Amino acid sequence: MNNLKGKVAIVTGGSRDIGKAISIKLGSLGASVVVNYFRSKEDGEATVKAIKDAGGSAVAVQADMTRWDECHKLVLKAQEVFGDKIHILVNNAGGLVARKTLAEMDELFWDNLMTLNLKSVFMMHKAAVPYMPSGSSIINLASQAARDGGGGGASAYAASKGAVMTFTRGMAKELGPKGIRVNALNPGMIATTFHDTFTPDAVREIVAEKTPLRREGTAEEVANLVSYLASNEASFVTGANFDINGGLAFS
């Protein structure tokens, strides 16, 4: 199942946490993986090494997903290394940046967050879709925050991720006739450096206790769902926003 041999995948923000797990999972299933990173070359190369050590094929590419020329560069590098076609695009790059209330936010903060989480997804669609054949798959990473508004000080983040969900539906309709599927994931509390940075331990414990499965999720569990959506096993699945939160919130 989920055989991805002969496929070329781009994973933005693919060098750590959920992105790293996705990159390694796709590589383990036979895809040639373009691992995008922004700051940490070391993390990017470590992810590529993990894929290659397991017998896969990968390359690390530095690119800033908030800039159109860098998004275009990433696609061109994928073609240079692995050929003209791109079969899988995972838009994982993004972040909370900081928790800020309405009173604390200014226009620049709002615009930067929307560029990081939403405009980046648009630009990668724009750059990659012309090279995606029928049967290709795009998976966008939204968030449970898109469903429930997020925690304190995360309203801008939640709004940006809600827009990713809506953009996913629009692209599914537009690209479906070309044979390209577009879906999104809404991860809940996943054990990553995101929550290490922005969520106090006490809050994490409360959330885990309220979750029906009584724990946080793992990056590998998110990667498993991505690999299904990237494969032909999900050939009739498009326009869907999948909650992966241990049952904490339902769509």
Image: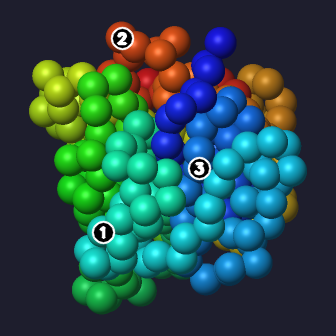
Rendered view: 188 above or below 181: below
User: Few, some or many C-alpha atoms within 10 Å of disc 1 (few <14, some 14-19, many ≥20)?
Assistant: some
Quarter occupied by the C terminus: top left
The quadrant holding residue 197 is: bottom right
Residue 99 as seen in the image, left or right of residue 202 = left
Q: Does residue 16 appear anywhere in the picture?
A: yes
The quadrant holding residue 244 is: top right
Which of discs 3 and 2 lies nearer the camera? The answer is 3
Q: Residue at the location (75% across, 60% down)?
A: 47
Instruction: Give the x, y percent position of residue 227.
Output: 60, 30
Q: Give SS at disc 3.
A: strand
Specify the amino acid type for callout 1.
His
Q: Give SS at disc 2.
A: loop
Mark nearer the N terminus (3 vs 1): 3
Mark nearer the N terminus (1 vs 2): 1
Q: Residue at the location (39% across, 44% down)?
A: 86
Mark nearer the N terminus (3 vs 2): 3
Q: How far apart in space, not on screen, are marks 3 and 2 (Cα)?
A: 24 Å
The residue identified by callout 3 is 33
Q: Does residue 19 appear anywhere in the picture?
A: no
Q: Residue at the location (79% across, 25% down)?
A: 213
Q: How far apart in space, not on screen, are marks 3 and 1 (Cα)?
A: 17 Å
The residue identified by callout 1 is 72
Question: Can you tell which mark lies on residue 236?
Answer: 2
Rendered view: 135 above or below 63: above
Specify the amino acid type for callout 2.
Phe
